[in-house]
Image (cartoon, helix red, strand yellow):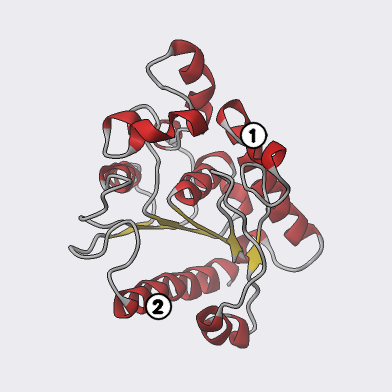
């Protein structure tokens, strides 16, 4: 599992993940946290390098880590999953469209995916400093390169995808995930979609958090095992 975020100066630092340890690591799997441009791990300049025009570079960083894991024999592309939520959902959405050959599965939660219209949905306008304004031609010229929904292609083979959103998400509109799922289905790709009534941009309670984790890990267990066989 390769997990990342890469935005808004959020730092992905080492921490204790008891549930992941029990359900993932104890079963012989590996969990990797990516420190990519756009995060706050190495100061303000690191964040700025992954903003706006640099957002694609942030995604390139994540892909470089995926390649390195395979080159060092830690995993293979068929056994490697990408996981992220919110801005991290945009990240792994771009792994799907830009680097499908590097992953065996994509777990994409409460994601931004349609960057052409994100400013017209919920909290989208507050993120223009991070991504750019799609209504400005000079901004859309680079944003088009990381708008995952627009970059899906007919005839391309994509790894299986699990898209998870919430009908009550008041930050990232569930329409992003809905549209992506519908487009992947139209392209006859393997896609699973889950949208509960409760929750929000996070989870409603511990029970829901546990269920969503189990849902994602079950998807990966079945998908990656099939990909590697």
Give the SS element for disc 2.
helix
Q: Can you give x and y, in whole percent of width and height, for residue 123 in the image?
A: 32, 39
Q: Is residue 153 visible?
A: no
Q: Which is more toward the observer, 123 or 216?
A: 123
Instruction: Return the mark for residue 48.
Output: 1
The C terminus lies in quadrant: bottom right
Q: Residue at x 35, y 42 (%)?
A: 187
> Which residue is situated farthest in the top direction here?
137
Q: Is residue 18 above or below residue 129?
A: below
Q: Can you give x and y, in whole percent of width and height, for residue 49 in the image?
A: 67, 34
Q: Is residue 222 visible?
A: yes
How far is mark 2 from mark 1, CA to CA? 35 Å
Closer to viewer: mark 2 or mark 1:
1
Q: Which is more toward the observer, 200 or 96?
A: 200
Q: Can you give x and y, in whole percent of width and height, for residue 93 in the image?
A: 47, 46
The N terminus lies in quadrant: bottom right
Please state if 51 lies on the left or on the right of 222 as rendered.
Answer: right
Q: Is residue 210 above or below residue 57?
A: below
Q: Quadrant of residue 176?
A: top left
Q: Residue at x 59, y 86 (%)?
A: 27
Q: Are marks 2 and 1 in contact (CB under 8 Å)?
A: no
**Which residue position is annotated with label 2?**
214
Instruction: Return the mark for residue 201.
Output: none
Give the SS element for disc 1.
helix
> Which residue is situated farthest in the left direction here?
197
Please state if 1 lies on the left or on the right of 207 as rendered.
Answer: right
Q: Is residue 212 above or below residue 193?
A: below
How packed mark 2 is, by other alpha carbons closer than 10 Å (few <14, some 14-19, many 20 or more), is some
Q: Can you give x and y, in whole percent of width and height, for residue 173 in the image?
A: 28, 44
Q: Residue at x 67, y 48 (%)?
A: 36
> Which residue is situated farthest in the right direction here?
72
């Amino acid at each position: 599992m390769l997990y990342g975020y890469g935005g808004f100066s959020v730092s992905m630092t080492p921490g204790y993940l008891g549930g992941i340890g029990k359900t993932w690591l104890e079963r012989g799997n590996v969990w990797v946290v990516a420190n990519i441009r756009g995060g706050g791990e190495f100061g303000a300049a690191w964040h700025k390098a992954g903003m706006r025009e640099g957002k694609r570079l942030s995604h390139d960083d994540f892909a470089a880590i995926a390649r390195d894991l395979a080159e060092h024999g830690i995993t293979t592309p068929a056994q490697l999953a990408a996981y992220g939520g919110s801005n991290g959902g945009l990240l792994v959405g771009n792994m799907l469209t830009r680097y499908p050959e590097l992953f065996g599965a994509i777990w994409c939660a409460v994601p931004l995916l349609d960057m052409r219209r994100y400013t017209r949905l919920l909290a989208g306008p507050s993120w223009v400093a991070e991504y750019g304004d799609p209504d400005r031609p000079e901004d859309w010229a680079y944003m088009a390169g990381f708008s995952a929904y627009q970059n899906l292609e007919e005839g391309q083979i994509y790894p299986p995808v699990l898209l998870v959103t919430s009908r009550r998400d008041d930050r990232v509109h569930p329409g992003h995930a809905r549209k992506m799922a519908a487009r992947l289905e139209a392209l006859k790709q393997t896609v699973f979609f889950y949208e509960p009534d409760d929750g929000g941009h996070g989870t409603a309670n511990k029970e829901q958090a546990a269920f969503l984790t189990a849902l994602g890990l079950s998807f990966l267990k079945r998908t990656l095992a099939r990909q590697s066989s």
